Amino acid sequence: MYNTNQKRVAAIHDISCFGKCSLTVALPIISSVGIECSVIPTAILSTHTGGFSGYTFRDLTDDILPIANHWKKEGIEVDAVYTGYLGSKEQVSIVMEAANIIKKDGGMTVVDPVMADHGKLYGGFPEDFPKEMRKLCEVADIITPNITEAVLMLGMEFKQPPHSKEYVEKIIEELSKMTSAKIVLTGVCFDGENIGAATYENGKTEYVFEKKVDAAYHGTGDVFTSCLLSAVLNGKDLKEAAQIACEFTAACIKYTKENEPNMKYGVDFEGRTPLLLKKLGL
Ligand code: PXL
């Protein structure tokens, strides 16, 4: 029997071979805090889709359930399933089924509905993708949409930051009607100076903020949710976990801005993992 004291996550995202996002972010961050991070790749791309042209794309839909079923046969189960970028809308129901196969009793599903930012769907996703992604959020335990992803799933209007409190709280209210999951809404910005997340659980909305750094890098959502999950599995409550994820992500962006002006090369989180361990008390 394998060591049942070891916490285990299955990360179901694409592999963007270059570009610091999805599995090349989830794996090192989650592993660095002492949690095993197994993977089910949804697709393999030569780079992410935000800023590179001519990237390759290999769909791995047909591998997802056979991987999950093999794990089941081997008695392998995980404390948390963490889903991110999916290769197609057909993968939504397959990923739901895979999660049920590999999650232990009482385990959780964390869904980052990766598909859009700055008011726009990422290249390659059809217009009805948010409607499918919504189904995965409906059955999750924690969801971490950004504002764009939330309004696309809800059919609400996208508004540029800074946001009014009414707008953000309306989004939270509609999300809470859509799912019983705990909610972490990212990219919340009330004043143009601070940016952070709204958390919602047990009917209560709270906010965590950091000073806004005037730069945007690819993959910061993946850094954020990987940290959030790492913190939750290390016993932090939702708001504490969002605070840690927010501080760590902001520190990475600040450091990156001093060294790398091009957003497509992603955020330099690699040298900052000791900071994350410190914040988690590890
Ligand atoms: O970071 C999100 C992400 C993940 N995977 C791929 C992407 C993106 C965002 O554009 O293109 C392939």
Image (tube, rainbow, N blue to C red):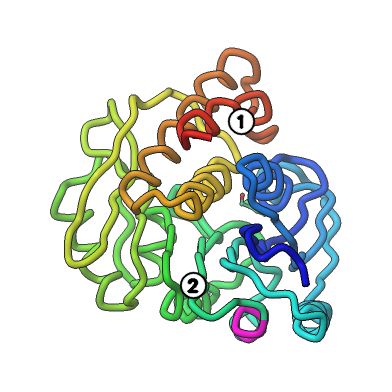
Query: Can you tell me whether the CB of the residue at mark 2 lies under 8 Å from the nearest atom of ligand 1?
Result: no
Q: Residue at x 60, y 40 (%)?
A: 218
Please give left or right for residue 97 compared with residue 48 in the image.
left
Q: Residue at x 47, y 37 (%)?
A: 280
Pick the residue in front: 128 or 265. Answer: 265
Please give left or right for residue 71 compared with residue 230 in the image.
right
- In the image, the segment drawn in magenta is 97-101
Q: Residues within 10 Å of mark 1 (few under 14, many from 20)?
A: some
Which secondary structure is most common in the magenta stretch? helix
Which residue is labeled 1 in the image?
273
Pick the residue in front: 217 or 250. Answer: 250
CA–CA distance in space, label 2 to label 1: 32 Å
Please give left or right for residue 170 compared with residue 79 in the image.
left
Can you name the residue that lies furthest to the top here? 258
Which element type, helix, strand or loop, lies under badge 2? helix
Q: Residue at x 64, y 45 (%)?
A: 34
Whole-percent x, y for residue 80 in the image: 57, 66
Residue 130, label in figure: 2
Pick the residue in front: 280 or 271. Answer: 280
